[in-house]
Image (tube, helix red, strand yellow):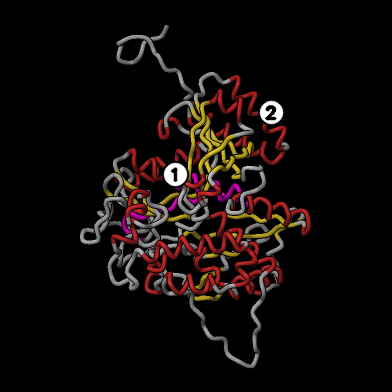
Amino acid sequence: MSKDTRGEGPVLKNFLEIPYDELEALNLEAAAAAEKLTPSELEKKYCVYLEQEKRLKAVTVCFTDIEGRFHMLDYDKQHFLRANDNLTFDGSSIRGFSAQQESDLRLGMDWGSIFWLPSDVFGPGKVIMFGTVLNRDKTPYESDFRARLADLAAEMKKTRGLTANVAAEVEGFVVKGLNAEQSYNEGAGFELISTGGYFHSLPLAPLKNFIDTAAEAQRAMGFRNEKDHPEVAPSQFELNFSCAGVVRACDLVQLYKLVCRQVAANMGMTATFLPKPVSGVNGSGMHLNISFSKGGKNIFHDSKGQDGLSKAAWHAIERILNHAQELSLILNPSVNAYRRLDPHFEAPNQIKVSSVDRGAMIRIPAGNEKSARLEIRSVAPDANPYLALYALLSTALDGEASARDENKRDRVRYLPGNIYDAIRIFRGSEFVRRMLGAAPHEKYAAHKQAAADRSPKELGGIVKTSEVLFHHDVTTQMLWHKF
């Protein structure tokens, strides 16, 4: 029997730990299998694997609530193998998810969503999968927008022959101290770890060390990273990864934030995805790059079209712009998000499209027959990615285009300047109500109103303690109950 590294006795634990190069190959193979195999084939494949891999102790099942919070439950591996078709949890314990009378919810497994985790970041002996939230009778739960996005993608493919591809650019800040959001005080603010800016940070500086460590973990998880760098604001970062189908793209966003938070915590720091954690510097966004393909061809490209875009792309743009104010609460879901929509900091608060103006909510990047796309810049990093993409795709396909009077000069419209206006417009939108369904529409509005009511009505010049502590993405559940 082997000895432990301290020479104090036999090794008692032998849980799965996989080198990064093998981990990347394993995760990329799983992503490819998800596109080729049926759900039943995937279930059989991974049940056999779980049974045979003795060094696995648990399966982490994750899901996202209507506001965008990421939830995880660990199931003992043997229990998971016996009962994965009957996994239940108490939805009433999750704010923003279920009423007390809906407390018994189920989790169905998306077997194609498996990821193997880097053990030096998350600990050994676990894999993670995404779950589909179901009612007691196993019917779809209407507030699970991951499942609804998957259904929308399937409907697009079946009835229109369309596939949506998405790449997300998610920015965040790293600040000093563990749990810096929970201990935030507006008098002191966050303590930044870097005073540098775009692209320049010493290779072994704390910010660059964080970026390198997080990027290494993401590559190992099959993200297919493209570039990783400090952003414009001090202590700000952005790690870009490749485009994917809409559901996987959202899964990667949620795992990206999880990786960044855990890596920062392992270093004694906090990664925050508040849209504007520090006044006076650029905020953080989650730019969503969207294109539609049909028969393997990008239908947004037209070399002879305006700005290289096809009529299909321009129709999508017109519909999104027409409904921009109604969608604002989905894309900018917090009190803090409306600080970011400040035109002095490259903020995309203008309801227009441009190939050059970064104040426009939709930008047209330079592209070709493969890369032509729309960049939706007005999305905050704390938005529920599944809900945001569900709303954007639904609007791009079936929204109403704005009526334009050729005899009048276009008047620049703006996104709401605060969450109160955004809630009012959202509540009054019959289009959004039909798109989401009456119950999710009301539930989402009610939770946004509850957050707004816990903060001063005027944003003012400093980030308030209340807008951090009562932010939906900050884990301060006891405070919500005591308010």
**Which residue is tagged 1?**
258
Tell me, for residue 87, which label it has, or none: none
Work out which quarter of the rendered image holds the C terminus and state it. Answer: bottom left
Magenta segment, which residues? 233-257
Rendering coords of residue 292 (x, y %)? 68, 59
**Is residue 30 left or right of 451 when viewed as pictured?**
right
Rendering coords of residue 104 (x, y %)? 56, 42
Query: Is 452 or 135 nearer to us in this picture?
Result: 135
Compared with 130, 150 (above or below) is: below
Rendering coords of residue 322 (x, y %)? 60, 76
- Queried whether the magenta region covers residue 394, the answer comes back as no
Are there few (<14), some (14-19), or many (20+) residues within 10 Å of tag 2?
Answer: few
Label 2 element class: helix
Query: Is 48 or 104 nearer to us in this picture?
Result: 104
Give the farthest residue toward the front.
101
From where the camera sits, is residue 289 visible?
no
- Queried whether the magenta region covers residue 255, the answer comes back as yes
**Which residue is tagged 2?**
44
